[in-house]
Amino acid sequence: MSRRSSRASMGGDNGEFYLECKAAYLSIYDSIKDEIESEEDLVQVLQQAGRNPSKKVLAKYWKADTENLAFDDFVEICKKEKATTADDLMKAFRKIDINGDGYISLEELYKIMTTKGEKMTRSEVKKMIDDVDENKDGRLDYGEFCKMIMETTEECKKMSRKIMEKKEQKRRREDQIKTSDSRAGSQVSLKSTTSLRSHNERPMSASSRSTKGASLAGSRKSLLSVDDLPKPSPRNKKSKGAAASTLSKLTEPKNLKEWTHTPSKGMFFLDEDTGNLLCHQYDLKLTEDTSVWITIQPLKSRCLADVDHVVDTGLFILRDKPDEDGNVLVSFTKHRDAKGKYGVKCSMDAGDYRIIPFTTGSRLKKREADPSSSAKLLQNKDGKYTISRAFRKALEDIFDLSDLDGNGTMSREEFNWYNIRTSDEEVGDDEWEVVEERLELENGEITKNGFLQLNELEAEDSNGDEDDMWVTLESLGFNKNLVMDEACPFLIDVYTEDCDDAEFKVAAIEEMMDKLQRPLCQSVMEKGEASKIKGMKDLTMYTYMSDTRATVVLDNKSYSTVQVNLDCTGSQNCLTNRPSLDETFTVKSQSQIIAYHFTPDNEDEEWNIKCTEIIQK
């Protein structure tokens, strides 16, 4: 995209348009000289300018080879992509009006506000409605809905103008008074998408990249000074004895055999494109207050790579809705037995919960290289294509792992989750009708033989083309030798003492960290050891260390974006989720990031974490 000047000869409406663009930009960045460095930040600054770009629109401006965009590029985009129109509002109204009665109720708006973007509490959503609900019937008609949106937009514009004016006033003062001890830290009070702000704080934009500027509301200056940079702050190493020496049996509840038991299998996957971790995630519904014991362990399968170690598996228990303090974290697994099973016991109130499996990524990683040869999936017998013996074995293993409840057959729901992962499509009524007509079923569920029949039918129709079959296999973590090396199956067992009708079922296959970033950081900050980083009073490193996992979180409470180099090369007997033990991290203002996960390489030996931090200019 060309970087033509957008400022030349702007007057009247054009001048007003330019000022709106500038105000929107300066509500995110310190200066219009700063560049947009990610697609995520492009979305936020466009939203600040009253645009709501779709993925298709974004793809036009942020392409695979785009590294950054300048302010002038942003102005050009705003020229082409118009602000929200009446038609857009009508479409949005109809989408939120789930029952189509011409009104948006508190429940309908609350559902949207707690599933999309920044989460809001019920009281916040109610206040939004009350502010514009002119006839006080507790719901919004189209006119009231439009008023709510437009008032929010105007309020946002006014705030952006105020921010711009404050920054320009400060810049003029700084131009007039240049002193040798001027501060290097930015003071822009802006939130990152991974911020651990309390639930009732208003959402704020992405952080600035500049090292100059004023805070969003004239907040205090960052305590990062030039004199303090760069000075390494070595830490005492955090050591653990041999993990194996502490691992024996989990302390299970004594009367566990009397508790209600619900199991489910699942899998961790590595996304083929991004390398991010995906996993089955679960809803747990409790109708009674009860003690709960939950375990998770990796599953063995003949299709898995033959390795000495087991992939670390844990889980987090989250509330379906935040508590009064804005927290969703209930508990997480801390203890493990010698075979790799993690367990956690807690008392839980009746209600809805989300169970998210967790692995550090220190063992389950993208393969370094593909095998030089490929297994044959099909064979031609008398002019008819059938699945090969090796492929049949892999399919049998896939069936066993996709049979989530372990009853020996695959239900429609289980087949649907298999289909979502392998083809990104749900099983419709027509497709299931074909399954019922052509495949072997037992009690309305697909048998293993029926699953093999399905693949034989696909082989017959393939004309020898194996491409679609490889897409399926690769989505499940198989390499060209039919070894599952980019996925890890697991088993979760849920036991409830006083709730006989607990419901535990798969709710999604999603990126593991989508809902886990905030509660994982919270767990480290609550349970870990805090270390102030020299050179910046508002920057803290938290290190959580159990017998089998260590996690490092950086918490930046200042109003500056800061870069921190963490050199952990002095650590011993460690595996990490990062490519290197010496990396530089950008921590946006008022936010937290997960810097490192560690696990012991050899559990029979002592392991320790030693990090040295340097704040970089």
Image (cartoon, rainbow, N blue to C red):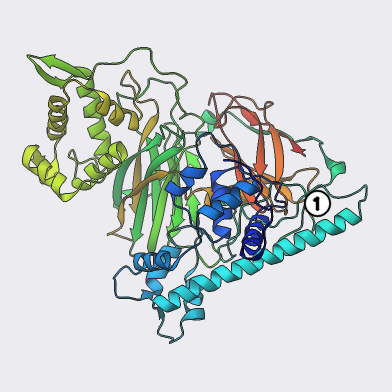
Q: Position of residue 608 (x, y in %)?
A: 64, 30
Q: Position of residue 410 (x, y in %)?
A: 19, 41
Q: Is residue 54 left or right of residue 455?
A: right
Q: Position of residue 350 (x, y in %)?
A: 38, 64
Q: Position of residue 416 (x, y in %)?
A: 24, 44
Q: Quadrant of residue 325?
A: bottom right
The residue that mark 1 highlights is 223
Q: Is residue 41 visible?
A: yes
Q: Is residue 462 left or right of residue 82?
A: left
Taking the view exactly as shown, the residue that stands out farthest to the bottom is 135
Quarter of the picture holding the N terminus = top right
The foreground one among 200 and 601 is: 200
Quarter of the picture holding the C terminus = top right
Q: Is residue 219 visible?
A: no
Q: Label 1 amino acid?
A: Leu
Q: Is residue 456 left or right of residue 143?
A: left
Secondary element at image label 1: loop
Q: Is residue 243 above or below residue 464?
A: below
Marks counted in the figure total 1
The foreground one among 344 and 392 is: 392
Q: Residue at x 15, y 50 (%)?
A: 429
Taking the view exactly as shown, the residue that stands out farthest to the front is 9
Residues packed near mark 1 inside 10 Å, few (<14), some (14 to 19) or many (20 plus): many
Q: Is residue 191 left or right of residue 151?
A: right
